[in-house]
Amino acid sequence: MGILTGLILQLFNIYYYVIIVYILLSWFPGARDSSFGYFLARITEPFLEPFRRFIPPLGMIDISPIVAIMALRFASYGLRSLFIMLGWY
């Protein structure tokens, strides 16, 4: 069971970095219009969209990805604690 729980937690960690890269792409003009940008958008937008619906942008700054990353980290830590309590990690 340890391998499966480690894999699940590692997937959370990888997704965290994918979101970071997607956010950084907004700093480069045309980067999100590349095939790599479209690929990252297809992976991250379903997760970011609910946060964008509830958190309005502050002027030109969209803080919803920051809240989404915090929620992802919180879920990862909670899942890890659950795995430890169940003795699976």
Image (tube, rainbow, N blue to C red):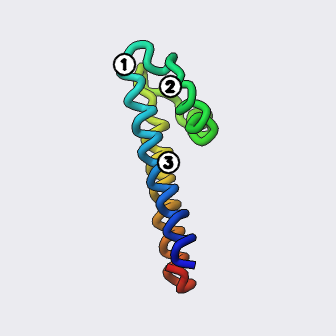
Q: Position of residue 48 (x, y in %)?
A: 56, 38
* Residue at position x 49%, y 71% in the image: 80
Q: How much space separates mark 3 and mark 2, taking CA atoms? A: 15 Å
Identify residue type, mark 2: Gly
- Earlier residue among tags 3 and 2: 3
Identify residue type, mark 3: Tyr
Q: Position of residue 51 (x, y in %)?
A: 57, 39
Q: Secondary structure at mark 1?
A: loop
- Earlier residue among tags 3 and 1: 3
Whether tag 2 and tag 1 are in contact, CB under 8 A, the answer is no
Q: Crowdedness of circle 3 by 10 Å Cα count: few (<14), some, many (20+)?
A: some
Kindly identify which numbered label has been placed on residue 4: none
Q: Position of residue 86 (x, y in %)?
A: 57, 84
Whether tag 3 and tag 2 are in contact, CB under 8 A, the answer is no
Q: Position of residue 71 (x, y in %)?
A: 50, 52
Kindly identify which numbered label has been placed on residue 28: 1
**Looking at the figure, which quarter contains the N terminus?**
bottom right
Kindly identify which numbered label has been placed on residue 15: 3
Q: How much space separates mark 2 and mark 1, taking CA atoms? A: 11 Å
Per the image, the residue denoted by label 2 is 37
